[in-house]
Image (cartoon, rainbow, N blue to C red):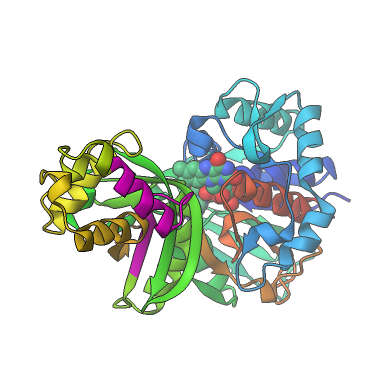
Amino acid sequence: MSTKVAIIGGGASGMMAAIAAARKENSVTIFEKNDKLGKKILLTGNGRCNITNTNVTWQNYKGTTPKFTASVLAQHSNLDTIQFFKDLGLVLIEEDRGRLFPRSNQAQSVIDVLEEELDRLEVEIFYNQKIKRIDYSKQLTDNSKTHFEIVTYQNKKHYFEKVIIATGGKSFPRTGSTGDGHRFAEQLGHKIVNPFPASVPFRIQNPVCNKLQGIKIDAVLRIYLNDKKVSEVTDEVLFTHLGLSAPAVLESSREVSKILQENKSAKITCSLNLFPEYTEEQLYKLLKERISSHPDRGIGNQFTGMLPKKVLPTILKNENINPEEKSKQTSNATIHKIIKLVTDYRLLVTDVLGWEIAQFTAGGVSTKEIDSKTMESKTTPGLYFCGEVIDIDGQSGGFNLQWAWSSGWVAGNNIQ
Ligand SMILES: Cc1cc2nc3c(=O)[nH]c(=O)nc-3n(C[C@H](O)[C@H](O)[C@H](O)COP(=O)(O)OP(=O)(O)OC[C@H]3O[C@@H](n4cnc5c(N)ncnc54)[C@H](O)[C@@H]3O)c2cc1C
């Protein structure tokens, strides 16, 4: 028998939930506050949509109980996602590290095929409908099975038997995800694990970052909390006018953001090793050799050809070492200091940039009160959750969208 289902939010997880529920012959309505569906999908993978990954396991996810994802992925895996989109006509191409993108290289293609399927299944879509409140009443006054009253900001009331909250997290609020789902969940009695921004650049007050802005280098990035190492990532680092960004930073940022959320004045330093392929001894030997070959070269230019030209002179100036000093005059103590600087360059991280620019939301609706087999609330029957609104976040590389597809599928598919 057809159940009347409301889906709050027409992003990746909401569209997937709608398709799954409608394929089970339920009567499905999406409420979306924007004038179109999937606004965030358009931004993913730099507009190309890194839709999923060939290597997805529960270990790619974080949250209070990341293993929660295992049972969801068991019902709808990355392979199911690939098949799902293939059936809709979307051809995917694999790139490095298992990342999958549409052959068209356009995120819009993903939305196009989803919209076509929603249309075929006659899913009702209300655009520009921002939901203000979701009320649940246990005691029914009639025989209609409508437990949920959904109220829009225009004070319109709608009644449904089941509701799926697919409102996303708090990151990139200009796409519509402003944390409303956390509020709805809390009002309906759910616990929220404090959300914090993930995959977000660092704010660093050291002028070196500003002076080197735009320069990208491969490095090992280590994060220290009070001199205790908390993470290590080898990847690209980009200097920006505000601090550091690029994959190594974005990947480390979850840890930093979490620490700062718990203690705003925590002392967090990052260390850059610009020569990870050398030991300190090898690098010292190499620098001495380069100095003997070019004794009149300024000491700051001795790594020209190995590092972007501006990097070493800028770092040296900032440490009160004259980069123009002839190398043959540089003392051994200074040479050791330079080796230390390029293999363990310490910068104080004062903050992470905020929600406006964070790619993912960590924290959210606690998984402890959601049944991982159905995505149904354990406390409010008929209420479901999917996507980034939940206390689960994945690594970069297609894992977050995979979570949206999987959890959306499980929520919609379990409604009858
Ligand atoms: C810049 C950027 C790049 C990214 N790149 C990738 C990538 O390449 N690969 C990857 O896997 N992940 C990527 N992500 C993450 C991924 O996009 C998200 O994890 C995913 O889109 C979350 O889907 P969702 O459906 O849970 O939430 P959302 O996509 O945020 O959708 C939630 C929807 O709910 C609507 N809504 C919210 N509140 C209300 C309300 N009160 N009433 C009505 N509607 C409401 C919103 O308008 C929105 O449309 C990226 C994120 C960003 C910001």
* Residue 10 in sight: no
Query: What residue appears at the point 70 percent right and 51 percent down from the top-left corner?
Result: 408
**Image location of residue 47, percent across then percent down:** 50, 31
**Image location of residue 130, percent across then percent down:** 47, 50
**Above/below status of 190 relative to 118:** below
Query: What residue appears at the point 54 percent right and 67 percent down from the top-left corner?
Result: 364
Q: Which residues are magenta?
A: 269-290
Between 73 and 21, the one lying in front of the other is: 73
**Image location of residue 2, percent across then percent down:** 84, 49
Between 153 and 404, the one lying in front of the other is: 404
Query: What residue appears at the point 57 percent right and 34 percent down from the top-left corner?
Result: 49
Task: Identify the image quadrant of the C terminus.
Answer: bottom right
Query: What residue appears at the point 82 percent right and 40 percent down from the top-left corner?
Result: 23
Residue 275 lies within the magenta run: yes
Q: Quadrant of residue 86?
A: top right
Residue 336 lies within the magenta run: no
Q: Quadrant of residue 142?
A: bottom right
* Residue sitting farthest toward the right: 1
* Residue sitting farthest toward the front: 292
**Above/below status of 88 relative to 219:** above
* Residue 167 in sight: yes
The count of marks equals: 0
Between 334 and 186, the one lying in front of the other is: 334
